[in-house]
Image: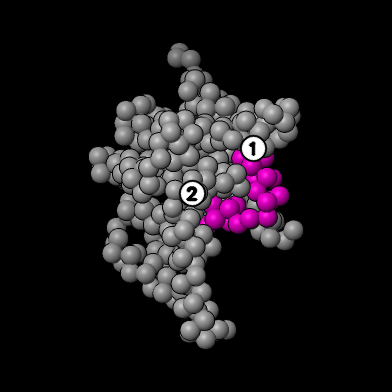
Amino acid sequence: MIWSLLNSLLLWYAVRRLLPDRQATLALALVYLEVLFAMQYAQSNGLVTALILLAFLALEQGRQLRAALLIGVDAFIKIFPLGAAALALFHPRRWRFTLLLAAVGVGLALLPLVVIPPHELVAQYHSWWTIEMSDASNVNRGDSVMQYLYRWLGVDWPHWPVQLAGTLVLLAPLALERGRSGDRAFRLRFLCSLLVYLVLFNHQSERASFVIAYTGLSLWYAASEPDRVRNTIALAAAAALLLQDVQIVPWAIHDALGRYRVKGIPCLVAWIVMQAELLGWRRWAPRSHGTEMGQTHVPPPEPLPSR
């Protein structure tokens, strides 16, 4: 119970710090059910997501050591959050951040020596590496793009070419739109894309992992001006979540939806749209903050009539 509360409350705190109040409320409402399911699985995906968001905020504030600590701890919970180091590419003193992250990684890697001897630690890391290499084989595709290629097209490629292609697409806006790196909205949308990417191109992703992708999708939708495409994606994501994770349809249909990983399809479509927006191929505008709750809109005074 305490572990689940830590995961959910830290994510709530991170989203609240990341977006203005009304946008944060919308994002949290959209991801609410997914957080509940993540709590039922008693996994660390909510915590993993929150630490990435907090690392983004730390980098925005110029606190590289804090960001390195957050990403380092996150990577020792699950290895793939190490990809959040890409967020540092927007900021100056990248080499300093790289050295800080490396130092944090070494420190965390050696930390177990406080309680176990060196030979046992080496054996633990060797065992972990063996498991990772085994999981990286084609046997396990998770709920990833590689799974979609296999299920839909019969493509039985190794994981790494697809993951490499996805990584190049993810990073393309950083190379092609370098002039926009000073725009916080651009950096925020890259963060959203990164969160979705970390699930879609992870061969170990599973149903419980989608709180990460759905957080990225929800943040993107909440921060963006509504339009037909974004509204459709948000509705499709909510529908896929309900149909696949809530047993409101006959079991045969529910089983088929799970077998074809329907839940990830809106995330894949959203990620493609996000990348198109980051590359400038599709128009993007921020969502209006509107009048905050509890505040009354006061119109400007009318000019006095001329005499």
* Residue 55 visible in the current orientation: no
Indicate left or right for 23 with 125 as reference: right
Q: Amino acid at mark 1?
A: Ala
Frontmost residue, 212 versus 52: 212
Asked where in the image residue 2 lies, by quadrant, the reply is bottom right
Residue 192 rendering spot, x and y as whole percentages = 46, 42
In-image side of 194 versus 207 (left or right)? left
Instruction: Using the rendered view, name the quadrant where residue 35 is placed.
Output: top right
In the rendered image, the quadrant that contains the N terminus is bottom right
Q: Main secondary structure of the magenta part?
A: helix
Mark 1 highlights which residue? Answer: 29
Q: Residue at x 58, y 39 (%)?
A: 27
Residue hosting label 2: 139
The one of 255 and 68 positioned closer to us in this rendering: 255
- CA–CA distance between discs 1 and 2? 36 Å
Q: Is residue 44 above or below residue 300?
A: below
Up-down relation of residue 110 to residue 86 (above or below):
below
Give the x, y percent position of residue 167.
35, 46
Judging depth in this view, the residue of 302 and 52 nearest the camera is 52
Tag 1 secondary structure? helix
Q: Is residue 48 magenta?
A: yes
Residue at the (46%, 78%) spot, across then down: 122
Q: Which residues are magenta?
A: 28-51
Vertical position of residue 112 compared to residue 172: above or below: below
Q: Is residue 167 left or right of residue 128?
A: left
